[in-house]
Image (cartoon, rainbow, N blue to C red):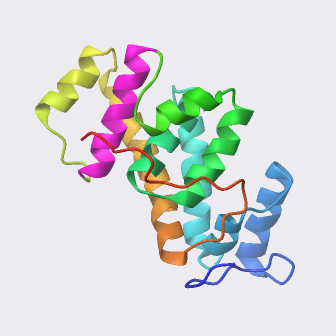
Amino acid sequence: MSTRIKTLNPATATGKAKELFNAVQKKLGFIPNLIKVFGNSPATLQTYLSLGELTASGEFTNKYREQLALAIAETNSCNYCLSAHTAIGKMNGLTDEQTEQSRQGLANDQKAQAGLQFAQAVTANRGQVSTEAIGDVKAAGFNDGEILEIVLNVVSNTLTNYVNHLAKTEVDFPSVEAGKYAIVQ
């Protein structure tokens, strides 16, 4: 399932990895391959799950977090996450058009679009964004707390993007390929 970092079998997992796999199984009804890769390091898996809970407790809706995840995954060229968040985005109300727009950093409303583009800039520039970029996202209506929440989403999604790159995680969602869109920085 993964060619460079093994994909654990939940049936034979033990200890903390098994406990975390059981929690994911209970919540989602299945254990995605990414989780099976993360299980090699229970501390990393627990961090990922905790980041997910923290992003969910923020100000952004599930739908907007999926839009951010798509924008970040496209910027990081992560096929696994594009595939997963395309499917999850549909479950959270994203249309096919909104999914494609999100990958490009576009949205139907100016504030949402500014946030997506800021997330892409943070991702592409590893946090080294210009004063102008911060001014633009603030001018669109984001406050300092929401800007930091965008960064939290970038961190959470970049963790999964990078693990998938390292592991070459086998996609277990309907496949979506990155690189379709040029990302403006």
Q: Quadrant of residue 131?
A: top left
Residue 25 place in picture, x, y as percent: 83, 59
Q: To which quarter of the image does residue 79 belong?
A: bottom right
What residue is rendered at 63% in x and 79% in y?
A: 2
Determine if residue 65 is in view.
yes
Is residue 146 something that shows in the picture? Answer: no
Frontmost residue, 53 versus 116? 116
In the visual, does 127 lie left or right of 70?
left
Q: Position of residue 27 (x, y in %)?
A: 81, 50
Residue 172, image quadrant? bottom right
Q: How far across and how far down the image is residue 29, in percent?
A: 86, 53
From this view, report whether residue 141 is shown above or below residue 125.
above
Quarter of the picture containing the N terminus is: bottom right
**Residue 54 versus residue 132: which sits nearer the camera?**
132
> 181 left or right of 69?
left
- The answer to whether 72 appears left or right of 32 in the picture is left
The residue sitting at 31% across, 15% down in the picture is 140
- Would you say 50 lies left or right of 172 here? left
Height in image: 34 above or below 175? below
- Total numbered labels placed on residues in the image: 0
- For image coordinates 64% across by 66% down, the residue present is 34
Residue 39: horizontal and vertical position, in percent?
Answer: 66, 74
Q: Nearer the viewer, residue 108 or 26?
A: 108
Magenta span: 109-125
Q: Is residue 110 magenta?
A: yes
Q: Residue furthest front?
A: 180
Q: Quadrant of the C terminus?
A: top left
Specify whether residue 65 is painted magenta: no
At 40% from the left and 33% from the top, the residue drawn is 105
Predominant secondary structure, magenta span: helix
